Image (cartoon, rainbow, N blue to C red):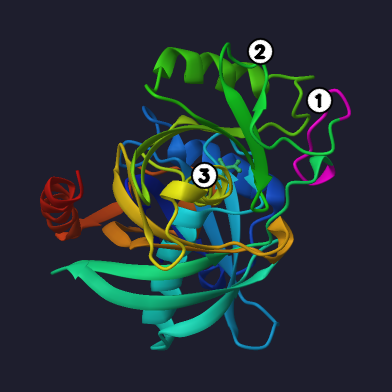
Amino acid sequence: MLTLIKAHGSGNQFFLLDQNQLTQPLTINALTRLARQLCHPQTGLLGGADGLLVIASSTIPDCLGAMRVFNADGSEAKMCGNGLRTVSRYLAEKTGKSRFRITTLEANLNVTRSANLAPNVPAFSVQIAPISMAAMDLPLAYHQLPELLNVPIPEFAAHQTFTAIAVPNPHLISFVDQISLDTLGELGQRLNAPNSYFPEGVNVSFAKILGPNRLFVQTYERGVGFTNACGTGMSATSLAFAMQHPTQFDPTSDLTVLNPGGLVKTHVTLGKTVATSTLRLIGNATFTAKVTLTEKDLRTGSFAQAHIDTTNEEAAYQTFIHHAKQTVL
Ligand SMILES: N[C@H](CCC[C@H](N)C(=O)O)C(=O)O
C-alpha cells in the first residue's frame, strides 16, 4: 500500500506523491496521466485538485528531496510556490528537520518551518527562485521587446499595463483598480492557446493594491485555469509591486497578499537587477486528507478501493482565515 496526501497552500489544492514508496518510479507519461486522473473535478479523487506534486530523492547536499510539478491538465511546471510549502512540510515530518533545501527543476531552494499561523495550521517559508524578466526565460514573443515592465498592451487588455516575470515559471501581472474575472479569464485562455505571445503559456494575475504592502491577487493559471491562489503568482506580483509602486512598498516588512483561498505573506528584497532580487513566500501547509491505495491502483488510475482518512486541519485553516481577513482588511 502507498499513501497520497491531499494538501493545500492558501486554498491551492494538490496531491503529494512520494515516489520513494513505489517499487519503481512512474515515467513522465504515467505522471502526466496520473495528474489528469487525480485532479479531474468530477472523476478525480476528493473533488480533484490544481496539480500533482511528485517527491523524489535528491543527490544535492542538504537537499532532503526533489519536487516536480504537474498541472491539472498534465503539463509540467518549473515551480509551484504554494505546493513547495506542502512538500516542505512533508519532508520536515519525514526527516524531523525544520530548515533544509528542496531540489526543483532550476534551483535548490531554501525552506524553513515557520511558527504555526494558528492552532493546527502549520506554516512554512520558502525561497522563490530563480527570478528573471528576460523574454527568453518566460518565453515571450512580443514585438521583440527584451522584457515587459509596466507596458501598456492593448492586444492583451484595454487601458492596462503588464509586467512579465519568471520565477522561474512564467507570470504576467497587471495592477488594476477592479479585478474583472471576465477580462482575466478571456486573457488567460487566449495567452495559453497555441501560437500565443507566450509559446509555452503563462500564468496571468490581476492585482488590486489594498494599501502599503497589502495586495489582493487573482490568478488564471496555465494548465489549470482560475485557482484560489498561485504562490509563484503572488510572489512575482509582490516583486512587480515593489518595482512599480515604490511609495507603497516598505522593504523592511513582509507584504500581506490576500487571494480567494485566504492569504499569504511575501518578502521582497530588491537587488540592482531582478536576478539579484530575492523572494520568499510564507504561508500555511495544510494536509486535508491521507489516501491509501495499492501501487497497482495508482498505476491504473483506479481509485474506487482507495481508503480516505480526512484530517481535522481544514476547519482549523478556515477559522484562521476568517479571523485573519478581519484583521488585515
Ligand atoms: N500553473 C503553474 C504551476 C503551478 C504554480 C502555482 N500553483 C503556484 O503555487 O506557484 C504553471 O504552470 O507555471
Q: Which residue is mark 3?
A: 237
Q: Nearer the viewer, residue 260 or 268?
A: 268
Q: Nearer the viewer, mark 1 or mark 2?
A: 2
Which numbered disc covers residue 142? 1
Q: Is residue 302 visible to the viewer in this orientation of the structure?
A: yes
Q: What kind of residue is marked 3? A: Thr
Above or below: residue 132 compared with residue 63: above
Q: Position of residue 187 (x, y in %)?
A: 58, 18
Q: Which residues are magenta?
A: 136-144
Q: In the drawing, does residue 273 fall left or right of residue 326?
A: right
Q: Nearer the viewer, residue 206 or 212?
A: 212
Q: Residue at x 64, y 33 (%)?
A: 150
Is-magenta flag for residue 142?
A: yes
Q: Which residue is mark 2?
A: 154
Q: CA distance from mark 3 to mark 2?
A: 20 Å
Q: Residue at x 29, y 60 (%)?
A: 287
Q: Residue at x 56, y 20 (%)?
A: 160
**Which of the two discs, 1 and 2, labels the residue nearer the N terminus?**
1
